Image: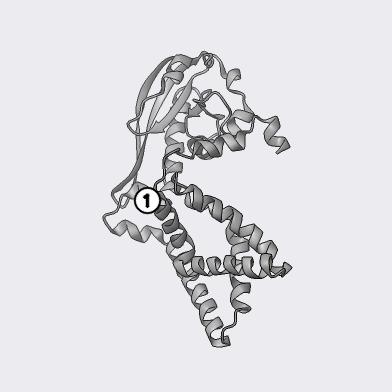
């Protein structure tokens, strides 16, 4: 909290910017529950729900302290995002910190349940098997590329193409004398290009908001690049935002980079060469 206070509450600004303010919408609730089923399997999710119920009964009402730590590490966070999902789409991983204590709570509740030993072993073994199947599926998600599904929407697509993009950006920088910096309006692009571009040029994030939104705003340094040229990278088909155009004397398109897998289009990027950075205009 002290660090966030000293840095303009950046964590809260970033997280709140991802929440879409909407009216009551049960569709987003079912979407969120569906993603939790997908991440944990329906069986494990139901066992965690059973564990939360037992945490209330045995921990809060029954005074059994053994249930309190895993209960308070699971129920408030998971419950908060379930409630929020009625009003806004929620990312599947937002509730992930509750999983660790949730698994402990679920296992403890099953072990101490008034069931036969055979039934307990059956539940725990089934949960382990289903969890293993999910892990296998996640690590082999490219098998879905054999089917007519939107390629860019597959989670593994986020991991593809950064080396090719970095090499193309590197070729532009080398052709221009090697003194350029990289700028994007997506923190993922800036992070990946800082790593994959040959020579590791300085990469910046163009923040379109009047408050800090990522670690790039804390690092700063963009104002020291005045007078230099830059490569701007964005999603394919998008042009530079007006803030960027006002910050350079000129920007022109250098071309596109398309990422393909076995001939199928995955995603694309548009690259722009921007001349003589003037500094960000006052907003």
- Is residue 265 visible in this depiction of the protein? yes
**What is the x, y in percent for residue 141?**
40, 59
How packed mark 1 is, by other alpha carbons closer than 10 Å (few <14, some 14-19, many 20 or more), is: some
Q: In the rendered picture of this protein, how many numbered marks are placed on residues?
A: 1
Image colouring: one colour
**What is the x, y in percent for residue 35?**
44, 56
**What is the x, y in percent for residue 229?**
49, 19
Looking at this view, is 118 or 179 the one in front?
A: 118
Q: Is residue 237 above or below residue 227?
A: below
Q: Left or right of 236: which side holds 5?
A: right
Residue bearing mark 1 = 27
Instruction: Name the quadrant containing residue 258.
Output: top left
Q: Is residue 16 above or below residue 271?
A: below
Looking at this view, is 192 or 126 the one in front?
A: 126
Q: Left or right of 183: which side holds 103?
A: right
- Is residue 197 visible in this depiction of the protein? no
Looking at this view, is 267 or 38 the one in front?
A: 38
Q: Quadrant of the N terminus?
A: top right
**Residue drawn at 42 percent across, 62 percent down:** 140
Q: Is residue 191 above or below residue 57?
A: above
**What is the x, y in percent for residue 231?**
46, 26
Looking at this view, is 281 or 283 the one in front?
A: 283
Instruction: Give the structural element (helix, strand or loop) at label 1.
Output: helix
Instruction: Name the quadrant containing residue 79.
Output: bottom right
- In the rendered image, the residue lying farthest to the front is 61
Q: Is residue 220 above or below residue 265?
A: above
- In the rendered image, the residue lying farthest to the left is 148
**Residue drawn at 49 percent across, 63 percent down:** 40
């Amino acid at each position: 909290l002290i660090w966030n206070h000293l840095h303009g509450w950046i964590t809260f600004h970033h997280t709140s910017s991802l929440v879409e303010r909407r009216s009551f919408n049960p569709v987003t609730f079912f979407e969120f529950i569906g993603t939790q089923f997908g991440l944990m399997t329906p069986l494990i999710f139901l066992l965690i729900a059973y564990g939360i119920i037992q945490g209330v009964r045995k921990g809060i009402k029954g005074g059994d302290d053994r249930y309190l730590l895993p209960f308070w590490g699971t129920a408030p966070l998971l419950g908060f995002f379930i409630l929020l999902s009625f009003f806004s789409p929620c990312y599947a991983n937002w509730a992930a910190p509750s999983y660790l204590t949730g698994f402990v709570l679920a296992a403890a509740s099953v072990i101490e349940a008034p069931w036969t030993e055979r039934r307990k072993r059956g539940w725990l073994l089934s949960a382990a098997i289903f969890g293993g199947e999910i892990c296998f599926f996640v690590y082999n998600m490219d098998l879905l590329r054999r089917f007519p599904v939107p390629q860019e929407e597959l989670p593994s697509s986020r991991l593809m193409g950064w080396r090719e993009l970095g090499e193309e950006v590197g070729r532009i920088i080398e052709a221009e004398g090697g003194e350029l910096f990289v700028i994007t309006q997506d923190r993922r692009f800036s992070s990946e290009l800082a790593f994959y571009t040959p020579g590791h040029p300085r990469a910046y994030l163009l923040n379109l908001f009047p408050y800090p939104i990522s670690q790039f705003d804390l690092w700063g340094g963009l104002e020291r690049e005045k007078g230099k040229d830059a490569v701007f990278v964005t999603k394919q088909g998008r042009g530079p935002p007006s803030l960027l155009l006002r910050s350079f004397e000129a920007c022109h398109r250098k071309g596109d980079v398309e990422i393909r897998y076995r001939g199928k289009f995955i995603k694309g990027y548009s690259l722009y060469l921007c001349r003589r950075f003037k500094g960000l205009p006052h907003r």
